[in-house]
Image (cartoon, rainbow, N blue to C red):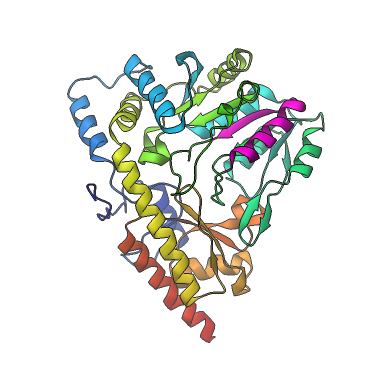
Amino acid sequence: MKHDFETLLSRKEKGCEKWELMYDWNSKVDEDVVPLSVADMEFKNPPEITEGLKEYLDEIVLGYAQSYPEYVESVISWLKRKHNYNIKEEWIVNTPGVINAIYGAVNAFTNEGDGVIIFRPVYYPFTSAINANNRTLVNCPLIETDGYYTIDYDKFEELAKDENNKLLIFSNPHNPVGRVWTRDELERLGKICIENNIIIVSDEIWNDLIMPGYKHTVLGSISEDIENITITCTAPSKTFNLAGLATSNIIVRNESIRKPYIKALKRMRSTQLNVLGYKACELAYNSCEEWLNELISVIDHNQRMVKSFFEKKHPEIKAYLSEGTYLQWLDFRGLGLNNEELEEFLHMEAQFFTDEGCVFGEEGSGYERINLAVPTWALERELNRLDRALNKLKQK
């Protein structure tokens, strides 16, 4: 493997949200513990980006920035090359994050009290965007069958027909359950939205992180009719570990949607990116495809190692393989612990730090979301730590 996926950098006392959250949970955590929670990577950034930014810093002033032709071309080229999705420059709306983009859509296309549909368990900022803006959360729970999740289309169509419901916030691929929705699934979803005048916010931030054997379909690529009701959220942040540079590319074809959307974002001061974010995105899309391919092989190996670990040592805990993302959905319900007991055990006794499933909705109770973007040897060490704690728990 050409790139380094073995080095682990300590992020302690460096302002890292994930690591500081771990110390908030357990201030006496062992020195060698690595948190497996918040979705950024414990890998070094691609050298093509870090070296490119070093050179760039010698050439520029760190002032206010705006989009420029090479940056735009890198975004257009990447979506075409990786996803066979053809866009135009004027469709790109920049925001400092996909969460900002979602909040902007809620503000632009719904009023207080209007219903916004989500499919739980799902990324918890979807819920925050609805509640913070005094909209009505309308949940259409995913159907779970032996760890495999599907959309309840009958329920969704019923909800879409309610004229009080205006917007769907959709995770594609799905965080946290790891589904990569098929073209047929997406086409059916889009058809229901078209027939019922539902605008779609399609969060596709995980679109590049697809496991071998699966294919991501951009929702807006299915048809012009679907594209014209869809706000497609993309970013290099998950793919290349650039979340701290706060750069997202939101694709909005339909001008009648794009104009009020931009107006809402400007009211929220959510259209200004930082100068290094633009350049890092350009470098990533132009120079880091080989790094990404290697990353995916590491993630797939890691998730299979996790699945094997639980099957062999603790079969009452289920680890399901993800079709996409670098996240894995773990079912701890077999331990017979409630949410509070499970978190107390994991944080204090096992020193095993994940994202608790209940934050993704009550449908996630008893589950944990694990971050696989960590050197394999370090992930194995954390699993061994959990193994020791589980063995003690079973002896009580």
Residue 148 or residue 215, whichever sits in front:
215
Q: Is residue 373 visible?
A: no
Q: How many labels sit on residues?
A: 0
Please give the name of the residue rendered at 53% of the width and 82% of the height, measured from the top-left corner. Answer: 394
Please give the name of the residue rendered at 64% of the width and 30% of the height, measured from the top-left corner. Answer: 200
The verdict on residue 200 being magenta is yes
In the image, residue 395 sits, relative to residue 127, either above or below, namely below
* Position of residue 148 in the picture relative to residue 302 (left or right): right
In the image, residue 7 sits, relative to residue 283, either above or below, namely below
Which quadrant would the C terminus be assigned to in this image? bottom right
**Residue 346 in the image: x percent, y percent?**
49, 67
The boundaries of the magenta stretch are: 181-203
**Residue 311 in the image: x percent, y percent?**
50, 72
**Residue 43 in the image: x percent, y percent?**
31, 49
* Position of residue 104 in the picture relative to residue 8 (left or right): right
The verdict on residue 144 being magenta is no
* Position of residue 260 in the picture relative to residue 14 (left or right): right
Please give the name of the residue rendered at 26% of the width and 35% of the height, measured from the top-left corner. Answer: 49
Please give the name of the residue rendered at 57% of the width and 74% of the height, measured from the top-left corner. Answer: 316
**Residue 254 in the image: x percent, y percent?**
60, 16
Residue 164 or residue 30, whichever sits in front:
164
> Of all residues shown, which one is farthest toward the bottom?
395
Q: Is residue 84 visible?
A: yes
In the image, residue 383 sits, relative to residue 322, either above or below, namely below
Residue 24's image quarter? bottom left
